[in-house]
Image (cartoon, helix red, strand yellow):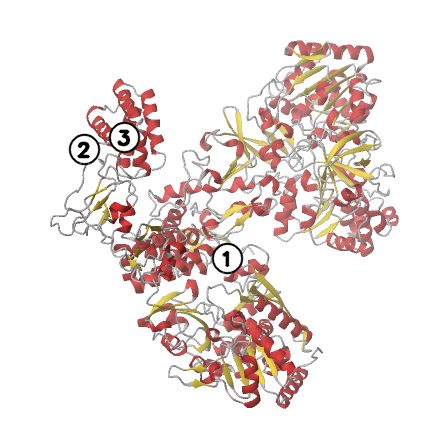
Amino acid sequence: MNTLVTLNIDGKEVSVPKGTTILQAAAQVGIEIPHLCYFEGLKSTGACRMCLVEVEGAKELVISCNMRVREGMVVHTRTDEVLKARRFVLELLWSTHPGDCATCEKSGACKLQEYTYEIGIDKSRFAPLREYDASLVDRRNPLIELDHNLCILCGRCIQICEVQSNHVLEFAKRGMAMKVATAFDRPLHEAGCDFCGSCISVCPVGCLVEGRRKFRGREWEFITAETVCPYCGCGCDLLLDTIDNQVVRARNSRRYGYLCARGRFGWDYVMSPERLTQPLIRKNGELTECTWDEALGYVAERLAQIRETYGPQALGGLISPHYPNEVLYLFQKFMRAGLGTNNVDSSVRLHSLPELVGIPVPLADANGDSPFARVREADVVLLVGPDIAARYPLIEVEVKRAQARGTRVITIDPLNTRLAALSQIHLQPKAGREALVLRGLSSLLVKEGLYDETFASQRQNFEAFKTSLDSFDEEQTGVAAEKALEAAKLYGDLSQRALIVFSPEMLGLSGIQEVVNLLLLTGRVEGGALACPPASNSRGAVRMGAVAEFYPGYQPLSNLQARKEWEEAWGVSLPDQAGLSALEMLAAAGSSIRGMYLLGENVARSFPNTAEVVRALSALDLLIVQDLFLTETARLADVVLPGISFAESEGTLTGAGGETRRLRRALQPLVQPDWRTICALSSRLGFPMEYDSEDGIWKEIETLLPTSVAGGGGSFYVQKPAGMAEETDETYPFLLMVGATRLHYGDGGRTGHSQLSLVEWAEDGVRVSPEDAAALGVAAGSRVRLSSRRGSAEATVQVDPALPQGLVFMAAHAPSAHILSGSDLELTTKMPRFSLWAIAISA
Amino acid sequence: MEKLRSIQDLAALRERLRQEKEKDPRPTVRVCCGTGCLAAGGDEVAATFAAENQKRGGDLHLVTTGCQGWCEKGPLVAIDPHGLFYQRVTSFDVPKILDLTISRGRPIERLLYQDPHGEFILRRDQVPFYRKQMRIILRNCGTMDPTNIYDAIRVGAYEALAKVLSSMTPDEVIEAVKRSQLRGRGGAGFPTGRKWELCRMQPVTPKYLVCNGDEGDPGAFMDRTVLEGDPHSVIEGMIIGAYAVGDISEGFIYVRAEYPLAVQNLTIAISQAEALGLLGENILGTGFNFTIEIKRGGGAFVCGESSALMYSIEGKRGMPRQRPPRSIEAGLWDKPTVLNNVKTFASVPVIINQGADWFASIGTERSKGTQVFALTGKVKNTGLIELPMGTTIREIVYDMGEGILDNKKCKAVQIGGPSGGCIPEHLFDTPIDFDSLTSAGAMMGSGGLVVMDESDCMVEIARFFLDFTQKESCGKCPPCRIGTYQMLQTLERIVKGEGRPGDIEFLERLGEEIKAYSLCGLGQTAPNPVLTTIRYFRDEYEAHIYDKYCPTGVCQALGRYRIIAEECLLCGLCSDVCQARAVVEGRDYFVIDQETCTRCGSCLAVCPSGAIVFERGEPRPRVLPKKVLVSEGDGKCDVLKTLEFFSEFAREEMCGECFTCMIGTEQAVTLLNRLTQGAGEEGDLERLEMIAVGVQETARCRRGRKAAEALANSLLQREQYEAHLREKRCPAGSCPGLLHYRIIAERCTMCGRCKEVCPQEAVFGDPYVPYLADNKPYSIHIGRCNNCGACVAVCPANAIVLL
């Protein structure tokens, strides 16, 4: 299909693949044909009439964004006739565009302005048809401002909204009354907008702009930092435009790139006035401001004291997987080498564990692209996990792009989500039974012979696995066997490139094992699955050894050779006791653990079983919290050290495919960078760590880090998969799911301080299915009491038709969400055993 | 209803039906129940027939038919075997018809058509309206009951389908259609056979078939009539089309939801055809499958455009898309799609039955067959007519239409709906076919034909059609969305009497550009009515623009209603009827206040004595007086004084170095100037205040600040400024630019009415004394006059003018 077509554009010969449009071909030889409605990557609509060109032999001017090249075509892009047409269109547009370029945010980056200048129109022939009408500016939501006065109705926003978001924008009305609107002209936040801001990124004029950007700087004054989005593990490229040490807007570096609401609007927490700027020390029960010197001195003294009294094993540290590799590495080095304990862990344990249990994870491809792009290339995509798109919005966009080129999608999701509705096959299991469905698919594949016999039979345990397979269990899974068979046939078609995308935190160990079984069965081990990392540096946290069982580079503590190498590298002897995992440390707080150092972990909000966590933290002799804000955990601390945000950090992240991503400083740090704090502390404790910059740390990591990756997984898992739901009974008949919403991330510690919280902030909302709401006799807005085996909380009911009966949902950033959840450990992975908890609801 | 299992079953059924009919001795009464006749009471007539028939023991075969065409004369009733054709029948006539005509065979003269010579015409085919018609598409409309498939089969429906399925290959069908040279009846006239062939060659499957019944032109109802009166011909044509193109098992008929009867009859027809096995799975036992679904449109004009129509079927917003790819390559759901008009499909069975060569023998060189027109407008006979291509417009208007209403002079016809063009009387010998119409600037369109007489203003007609297309523009591309709006704005100015030199050229150029650069057919044809009316009636445009005169008197802004005092009976009816309360009652007269008058014409209609006249806007009297009659109040007003002060200041004193003084002064001069000219705008006083305060605060030197202070002081005379701004009046009478009412001495008859009505007592002068030779005319005190205009309204001599 790669036939080349040669044509002549303005006297230049150009050879392009067949099927290219004239506009694209012209771009290849550096000729920009003006266009307002066409946008690379979107379907051409031919609406704006700007890209007209003259093709020799054609009766009339043709639309170059739509016309495919033909061999020997001769195209002229700037003849008098063409310019006349463009001038005409521009003059018409100006008669309806009562904008004032002096105050327009887009001035200087506006396509209408650019083309008008280029063609040289000083005065329109036409009478202006409209006066600027201030009532036509839609500021009903704080994030996206829509100024209908400036709209030229190119339709780009509508098209991209369909592809990248919820298709809430459409044209309304006809003729001159036509406008871009939501259904019934409701405000965006009520019309189901995702606030991905894609519409802003494609608007050629100043009609759609970020609400908070107005009058904060012109486009040509921006200083741009290329960094990475700090939230989920999708790791989208993020450009931060700054002026005067203030972020003005965020955008994606790629032309057709995507940012979700968190990425596009969730950055302004870095400039929040609530940020901590001074260390705090508890004096007389009150946290009071003090100098860095005083705080560090106090911390060092107390740590030394505890180490002295109880031994180094009485100390423990937790670090958030959002920190760059450098900080993660330093932290574990400080804990292991400086303090002499292996009690170092991260909340990554609660959410993402494929590497922790030695299960292969996808790697970046040769040119270092994130594995998320692979979704686009797959023929069949199997999505596993509840509401995966709310957790990882990029997935939905990639899936939609893939679908546009014919990819078929199977979703295993207990919820009736948007993505499930878009899928070709939606298997809706009972909540928490995804692993069972996967096992069922395996059994169907084997039964139908849809597997790679030669590959699978060479793997360990294949025969045992095969004999362990029962027939597909409709009763247990809640999925009709017929539908499952359909899915199995689709996934089992070995001629297709298939990809499993799953959210590990909701599947648990057995779910991941079942994914591995499917991969081994179909021989798709290489690049056949994509585990979504829940945090921007989840993989880095494990790779840098910020987890209890690994030294940096996935080397287990039990590996004596590795230990020796690290001892040599760091010049100390390392402890031989195994480290405690995050939940184990908290469980031991007050007994064997006496002091903890928490870096960016708001455990009192984001760890399961809040009451227990608070009890544990209060029982400690020393609690050090280093964070951006005075979080719930920080309020319990003895010392609070301020930290810096991603926008102030230099460093590296490890992407979903293990690739190294650069985090670049966009703003001057508000306080001293975290790595300096750790170094200073370490030096005071007699283990000096000297680095001149983040680069220095990275160099050390690069030299010392072994090249091996987490491997293994050549063996089938035979054991019957466990469910992820706690047992319900008559007292606690409902299952509670705690998860992300599209606008907020995790415990809301950062998004809650951003403009996103102005649009949506589920302080204490609980979503209930319509059936359950009816059965309970509650309606939206009713207050109910939720209770679990661990505690109880009040909440306001929201009715959500996406939920199946018996399942209720709370946003992870709701303060009461984890009051109800439990911290029973799964023994292999030491993560919580369940992701769904039995609760009761009383009106 | 028993399913037909084979082609022979169908033939046997038809034969049986025909014989049954032949054996039926009862006379047949066909009552037209098309939409036009229904509106005139056709259903009542039919119901009365039915009731009477039952009373009399059912000796009558009653058929309620679809539209018989001559809507002007509805409800229509045709009676066989007498062959009588009654028009304007009411339910009261029914017993009489039964008694006289049916029982005794006597025609009722009152119900017969009477030709211009006074002769009664008995039979339909002798009526001039029908005589020249050639009904191919409408062959069964009005002769059968559209809700009864047996009726349709008896008159030949599905005969062509049987022939196609039994003895023709798809290629032979396409060949036959190509040979017939049938061109699409939707407007553009693309050869149907060629379209089918191109779609047949597409490798992608499945394919779809769409029938376009989205008839959006105002005044056009051809498609509706066919769908209402003979849905089976369309269904049959579609099945044949699907068979010929191949790989089609689903078809859609897109009908406007505003056509409830068409939707209803179609639904009935489709379900009956399905029940008989003529549609659906395994048609007539041949293994060929085809289903038809009705999609109802929401009434957007643009959805008649094929790609917009397909989007609408898909459930999306109906907006045309750029081509290529063409619909035959990627249409509905991106699959190859054949889209044809209702009339095109209805023509297909005839071509199959009668032969392609027969069809090709009708019409002109490049346009074959017949076309259906909805004849409306100022013509005596309105209704639906079907004619061979090549018939001249003159024949249509004068033979079928029997000339113009009230025997006025014919001016033009608008062909092709709002996207078509106006063809003037002198081109009436143009034969109607695709190409001649296009070269005359019009187009075949869907076949609307509106006749206009000498009382129609062509500018207003153009404005009317453009207003329609502009509002119906989908809005996608700027040339159509904004361009037509720009044109409309200009036309609206012209009909309001605010046309400017250059407007015609502007419209012409803009129209051509819109045609050249618009995305779809709607935009490419929208300027046609304007361009053709300019082409053929340029003088009317010029009269509107240059003479402020509407030759037909239609444009009411260019004329006025006036009460002729001498004729007035003082009955007061005009005052009672006036919604706008524009009729002012005096002691012994009525006058119309021109400012309030909305020119609705109600007063003219009720006036028993003909005292109210509509005066067409002759060029407005802008007579200059010999001298200013009254100039009392020699002092200048504050506004003028301040203006002069600032002009002086700007010219002599201002150094121009500091911005605020310089620009502030210039601004003040501009604003004051426009106030004295009567062109002040809302907010000007506030602007002046802003300047006064701002310059006082920021000017560099004392002079500037002093000047601003003077302005501030002057602004204290607020009433004076207000009068200039809002009333366009200078209380001191000193501002030369402001308008005043003045009495032209030469015209004044000294009747004194102006003095009587003046609320300001601003009219001076002695009452008329007949025996005095040197009676002075009346005059108006500019200082007192508040420009209310009451005097103008009452002046019988047009002696008072605004100057």
Do discs 2 and 1 share a chain?
yes
Q: Where is residue B22 shown, x and y percent of the image? A: 62, 89
Which of marks 2 and 3 precedes in the sequence?
2
Which one is in front in this view, the residue at disc 1 or the one at disc 3?
A: 3
Kindly indicate whether the residue at mark 3 contacts the one at mark 1 (C-beta within 8 angstroms): no
* Chain containing mark 1: B
Q: Secondary structure at mark 2?
A: loop
Q: Which residue is mark 2?
A: B634
Which one is in front in this view, the residue at disc 2 or the one at disc 1?
A: 2
Type of the residue with mark 1: Pro
Kindly indicate whether the residue at mark 2 contacts the one at mark 3 (C-beta within 8 angstroms): no
Q: Which residue is mark 1?
A: B320
Type of the residue with mark 3: Glu
Q: Secondary structure at mark 3?
A: helix
In the picture, the disc for residue B666 is 3
Do discs 3 and 2 share a chain?
yes
In space, the residues marked 1 and 3 are separated at their CA atoms by 52 Å
